[in-house]
Image (spheres, helix red, strand yellow):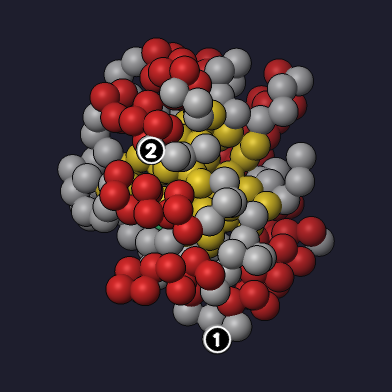
Amino acid sequence: MTNQIVVSILDCDFAHLADEVASVDERADRYQVDVMDGHFVPNLSFGFPILKTMRGLTKRPLEADLMISNPDEHAARFAEAGADLVIIHVEASQKPRQTFRAIREAGGRPGISISPGTDPAAIRDYLDEVDMVLVMTVAPGFGGQPFLDERLQAVSQVREWITETGRDIDVEVDGGIKPQTAAKAAAAGANLLVSGTFIYRSANRHQAIAELRQSAAR
Ligand code: DX5
């Protein structure tokens, strides 16, 4: 289980998406495409067209983080559109097991996410079906928010449950990830670190990714 840096494109300059990807692609381990419907979260971002564009811009793995109210209906289509991983939010899914299988049948790998305020136990029963658990370290919906330290307990608890399963499941954190918080999240048990604003607002994006990687390795 290696530490990986996941670049969130939510904060990038979409007028120059190809350049924005090219500016980080050599150092990024994977990307996260933050899909928001303005209903599950109070923000509206993008969907299939941007995912398909991203698929043509990089060979790195793509995660589709579905911050939408009806993930069961759309999840498989994101895998068909090129997402390597499709993350559904446990708070929104009515039939997660069916959706995890639909994602795999469409050629993707399933992940499940929990937000602040949700008991981490809500995902425990699904650890036999997912390849990743995303512990949100901010309320989903916007980039640039401050990291919530109280989420570290949920990270540790999920990592403990995963260890008990004996399965190789990644733990991802997303929201407010900078070098200081990357170190804390990795120490708590996360191995996938999603970062958007810290990377895209840095003068040297390669160095920013290297800093995150070094901080997580400590
Ligand atoms: C929240 C979003 C953000 C984004 C990255 O729904 O998912 O967490 O990916 O946020 P920052 O800019 O804090 O790295």
Ligand 1 under 8 Å from disc 1 Cβ: no
Extreme-front residue of the structure:
56
Front residue (pair 183, 96): 96
Within 10 angstroms of label 1, few (less than 14), some, or many (20 or more) residues? few
First in sequence: mark 1 vs mark 2: 2
Identify the residue shown where x is 43% and y is 61%: 9
The residue at which mark 1 appears reads as: 203
For residue 134, side relative to residue 157 (left or right):
left
Left or right, residue 71 beside residue 31? left
Give how far apart the Cα atoms at labels 1 and 2 are: 32 Å
Amino acid of disc 1: Ala
Q: Residue furthest bottom?
A: 203
Identify the residue at image location x=65%, y=37%. 170
Q: Say the numbered circle drawn on residue 81.
A: 2
Q: Is residue 24 above or below residue 106?
A: below
| Residue at x-position 43% and y-position 33% | 79
